[in-house]
Amino acid sequence: MSLKNYIQGKRQGKNANQLEREAMNDPFLQDAIDGFDSVQGEHLPVIEELERQIANKTTKRPGHYRIWIFSAAASLALLLGISTLMNNSESVEPHVAKQIIENQIDSLKQIFVAKDTFVAEKQLAVAKEKPVVKPVLQKKNEPVTETAIAPPTFIARESGQNIENVSIAEIIPSESIKIETKSVAIAEQKADQQSIRIRGVSSIPTSQPTMVYGVVLDETNRPLIGANVKYNNGYAGTVTDINGRFTLPTPKDKSDKLVTSYIGYEKNVMALPGDSAIIRLKPDNLALNEVMLVGSTGRKKQLTGINSTSVDEALQGRVAGVDIRGSRKSRIFDESEFKKYFEKNRRQNICANKASSIMVGFYIDESGKATNIQVINCDCAELEAEFKRLIKTCPVWANVNRDVILTIRLK
Amino acid sequence: MKNNNKISNLTDGELLQSYIESGDIAFFGELYRRFIPKVYGLCLKYLGEQEMARDAVMDIFSNLTDKVRNYEINNFNTWLYSVAKNHCLQVLRKDKQTIFVKIEDAFVENEDFFTLTDIPQSQEELAALEYCMGTLPEEQQRSVKLFFFEEQSYADIVEITGYTLSKVKSYIQNGKRNLKSCLIKVLSNK
């Protein structure tokens, strides 16, 4: 299918699919499709007119020669006319006459050169004018400037293409945007941050804003850096910058919702703000303790699970120098907690499933670890081995510097 | 007019070459004519408006006739894309106080994937593909299947599944990405 057909709305069927797949690999085609989708109007007549214009400029038509013949005839006639003038008038100086002739010839030339000079002049004009380039700023805070907003444009930079620099500028909110502090918001997206998917380019704004600015704060009103802000429909997404600020293009689908998330905080879903938003996230206190750690041995299908009810417990003892104390009072690690821990983590089916028991004595040292482990009584070697294993891997004991005597009976 | 028929049978590359060698603008005219819809569409996207886009198409043409001779062009499509885009950006910079946002597009299209679906290389790759398709979430799996394996267009898929157009596009995009990483894992883990 040709692009012309697609523009006309023929979007169904294998041929349309083929064009769409081509567009996936050809950013030029994708941009063109975006353009036709984003701007209103009858495009086909314009295209045909352009084709005509180009054809006129580049093909030699028989009609062309007529112009030259005409010009030759005209200049001849003029020359004749002037010469008769000269003959009739004695007062006309020869050099004046010559001047007149030259002027006439020049004016004739101009008619035919006009078209080219027009183009050339336009190019000159383009070259002469200095572009208004705003330098890229590393500063983050600037007073609000009074510049009016022109149509903001989003140009996705292509990777792997030899395209000259797309310049970067700061985003200057207009006076109508209400952001807490009066400072310039800059959205600088680094390569390794989350990508932004831009679907279309906004047309010249009338009353509708084409960008959404915002800031994400935590419950103490401090900015959250690196929070994830995206649209529910996956239209676009970004992360907040060092000031907690973000900018997103306004989606065409007004029913889309803005979803803000950050680890350790509750997800926030809200309807589309007009042009700006202040988003406050609430901490999600449960999240961390409900994480299940899963490790892999590296082989494809085998996974070892370290089942743990709390991240602190799982980390305890694994990382040198890391000492995590339970934060909740009910989780003070003591004898009864150890018994629970033992029962949960021991190997099952030891001691031929007999109701074996073991009595041990040990000392809880300064750092909450069991030392000087003495087995007082034990009727099963496997049980002893399991105890010794688990007394090493268990969490830190709460009450330190004391002797403990413990009896564990297998159920 | 016989001349025109011959010209329209040439490939883009041949047209370009002929123009450079002969200087006959008819060749270049035909070449540019073929790209007019794309250039016009691109200008529409960046300039946002028909009149300006129309002017841009003609301006780019005028500038091109010289440039084409001065640059070594391997791929006309890619080269024209950057010339046209830069022209539009220049226009924007000059005419209005346009604000530019630099964006990294992390959704890079993967050529490997494309070859895999079109021409499966081996039984092994076919099996890997089948397996990885199975790992996709339902919407992504459906969309990718319809688009690549059943050659349905976006509009078709919207009709069939009831997903919105933008969702279809993002399911396909994410599905491709997930497939790619799955395939890499599976095929390299031998």
Image (cartoon, coloured by chain):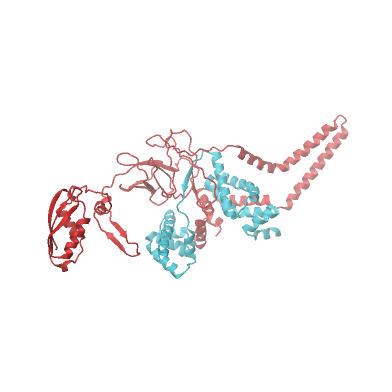
Q: Quadrant of residue A314?
A: bottom left
Give B116 or A152, whichever is nearer the viewer: B116
Give B57 or B121, whichever is nearer the viewer: B121
Q: Quadrant of residue A128?
A: top right
What quarter of the picture does the C terminus of chain B occupy?
bottom left
Rendering coords of residue A124 (x, y %): 64, 39
The answer to whether B65 appears left or right of A303 in the picture is: right
The answer to whether A30 appears left or right of A350 in the picture is: right
Figure disc tally? 0
Question: Measuring 80% from the left and 34% from the top, which residue is drawn there?
Answer: A99
Give the residue at the far top of this rendering: A91
Rendering coords of residue B85 (x, y %): 55, 47
The answer to whether A174 appears left or right of A44 in the picture is: left
Question: Measuring 67% from the left and 53% from the top, which residue is drawn there?
Answer: B20
Colour in which the image shows chain B = cyan
Give the residue at the far bottom of this rendering: B123
What quarter of the picture does the N terminus of chain B occupy?
bottom right
The answer to whether B56 appears left or right of A242 in the picture is: right
Residue A294 appears anywhere in the view:
yes
Give B12 or B69, whichever is nearer the viewer: B69
Q: Quadrant of residue A387?
A: bottom left
Residue A42 appears anywhere in the view:
no
Colour in which the image shows chain A = red
Rendering coords of residue A301 (x, y %): 33, 65
Rendering coords of residue B171 (x, y %): 41, 57
Give A389 or A25, whichever is nearer the viewer: A389
Instruction: State whether residue A107 is above or below residue B5.
Output: above
